[in-house]
Amino acid sequence: MTENSLWLGSLRGPVKKAAIGFAGLTAVIYVWLVANQLLREGAIGMHEMIRPSLGGPIVTVMLLCIAGTMLFTSLYLSDTQGAIEDKPDGFFDILSLVLSRMAMVSIALVVIVMFYEVVSRYVFSRPTLWANELSLWIAAFVFLLAGQYAMQQRSHIRIYVIYDIMPRWAQKTCDVISVALICVFTFALIWGGYNDALRRMLRMETFGTAWDPAIPGTIKPAILFFILLVTLQAISNLIADWNKDPQQFHKDDIDETEIENIRKTLEEPK
């Protein structure tokens, strides 16, 4: 198992077992909560799931199990390299891969939530008060996590028609300028938004709806946190790529490269 490991090594097996264990415990508690909803009045519902003080210890345990499932699943999935992914080089690359897998799992959660809403609304005529807001809440974090992954994979926009014809010293100069501009933007964003984000987080500002999730109280601080991570990843990329030969992109071979990558991906054994 460790032969195919990207960075976990001997920890790959224990991490996989931890992910399965947390997922199994989450499923058991979920079934128990659903059964209580069907069998007795005043059972714990989604209103209490975002308010552990009202739901009691079982809600706290459920949230911890969900967090453990997300964490260990993301760690395990990040230990494999995708067909079109660059190999991680250093701490920030690995962190970005872990966060990218967390985004992948979160997308699956959005699908499950919306599927539940559709079935509940159109089959049982019992629309929920929380499905749309929960999907928006998760999608906001997916958007932030995707930015981190795009920076690690160098998938952001770059005008290669101009960049490729520059000498290497000029390319390095452009890289330094672009990273410096990212740092300036991040500094300005944190400087201007820190107090507001801290105020919203400390009072856990809610959405003002029937379910009333703490979307403003979590998303605003998360924006500042993840833009800082993106900036650190950009600096890490600059350092890692400084002595590397730049990858050349020409109009005549872009399509052929993409077609070859797709072909190799489709031909890989399942």
Image (cartoon, grey):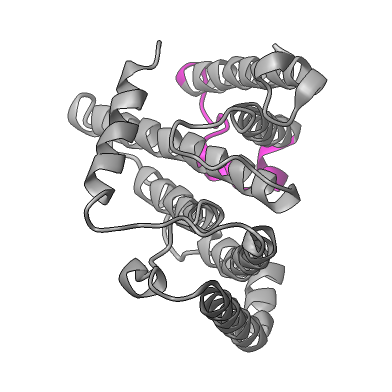
Residue 71: x and y, percent? 67, 35
Q: Quadrant of residue 69?
A: top right
Q: Closest to the observer: 151 or 170?
A: 170
Q: How many marks?
A: 0
Q: Closest to the observer: 103 or 3?
A: 3
Q: Closest to the observer: 233 or 101?
A: 233
Instruction: Find the residue positioned furthest to the front.
Output: 167
In the image, residue 161 sits, relative to residue 63, either above or below, namely: below
Task: Residue at 25%, 36% (x, y): give it.
Answer: 259
Q: Quadrant of residue 193?
A: bottom right
Report whether 225 appears left or right of 162: right
Residue 111: x and y, percent? 35, 34
In the image, residue 153 sits, relative to residue 224, either above or below, namely: above
Q: Which quadrant would the N terminus be assigned to in this image?
A: top right
Residue 27: x and y, percent? 57, 18
Task: Residue at 43%, 37% (x, y): give it.
Answer: 84
Q: Magenta residues?
A: 38-56
Q: Is residue 55 one of those drawn in magenta?
A: yes
In the image, residue 58 sits, relative to residue 35, either above or below, namely: below
Q: Which quadrant would the C terminus be assigned to in this image?
A: top left
Residue 122: x and y, percent? 18, 30
Q: Closest to the observer: 219 or 131?
A: 219
Task: Residue at 65%, 84% (x, y): give it.
Answer: 187
Report whether 54 appears left or right of 211: right
Instruction: Find the residue positioned furthest to the right.
Output: 10
Q: Is residue 136 one of those drawn in magenta?
A: no
